Image: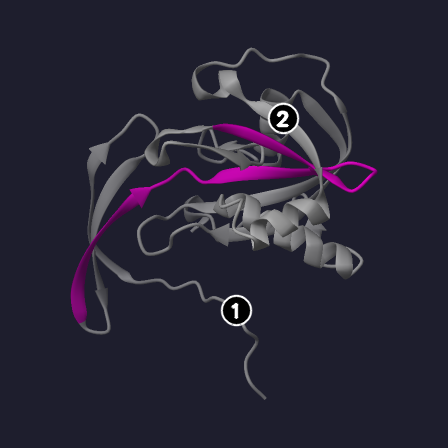
Amino acid sequence: MSEPLRDDLVTVDLVSTDAVFDGKVWGIRREVFRLDGQDITREFMDHTGAVAVLALDERDRVLLIKQYRHPLRVRDWELPAGLLDFDGESPLAAAQRELAEEADLVAETWHLLSEFMTSPGGSNEVLRVYLARGVSAAPEVFARTEEEAGIEVRWVPLDEAVDAVLSRDLQNSILAIALLSAAAGRARGWESLGAAETPWPRHPSAR
């Protein structure tokens, strides 16, 4: 019988690790590690990790936000999302904060929907997507600045949003993975959902 299909966490001999660039949001790290008898040097984005929220209402509509993203010069449709603000921050608390800050919403129930590595060849970023249901207006409206000042909010039927991903009209990777995960999860009676407080051993700070 074949082994279960899953990624493996690996411990390698680390020869050296240096922060070669310390940016406003994240940095670049250069590491030399020993793998299969040879020393290999790699540089990668040293990321805090992030969370995103797929808020679903009682009519099976998902909350989308549109904002400007400078590296690609695009205003793309996304999910409320953000970085973990500090080492050891609860990802659930971070997700709840982002939903309130970017969409002025709170939710009654939270589940783990998806978890993935955004670019494992060049970044140690890992990201969790939470499914939030029972949404209502937050008691406080947040002032938004910079790119977030122009956020556009829209409730869209889940099936319509999935169709837009499949037609390549929506191309944000976090949004695409979350929407397809939600559609597949719904088709299976949501049996794939995880507890909101599920441990996160794949986060770099946990290793």
Q: Residue furthest bottom?
A: 1
| Residue nearest the viewer, comparing 136 with 183 | 183
Residue 54 counted in the magenta span: yes
Q: In x, y percent, where is residue 60?
A: 78, 42
Mark 1 residue crowding within 10 angstroms, few (<14) / some (14–19) / many (20+): few
The tag on residue 25 is none
Q: Residue furthest right?
A: 58
Name above or below for residue 110 compared with residue 146.
below
Which amino acid, mark 1? Arg
Name above or below for residue 29 compared with residue 135.
below
Q: In x, y percent, where is residue 139?
A: 73, 14
Residue 181 counted in the magenta span: no
On the image, numbered disc 1 is attached to which residue?
A: 6
Q: In x, y percent, where is residue 150?
A: 51, 18
Q: Which residues are magenta?
A: 38-67
Q: Is residue 84 visible?
A: yes
Mark 2 residue crowding within 10 angstroms, few (<14) / some (14–19) / many (20+): some
| Residue nearest the viewer, comparing 134 with 16 | 134
Which amino acid, mark 2? Val
On the image, numbered disc 2 is attached to which residue?
A: 153
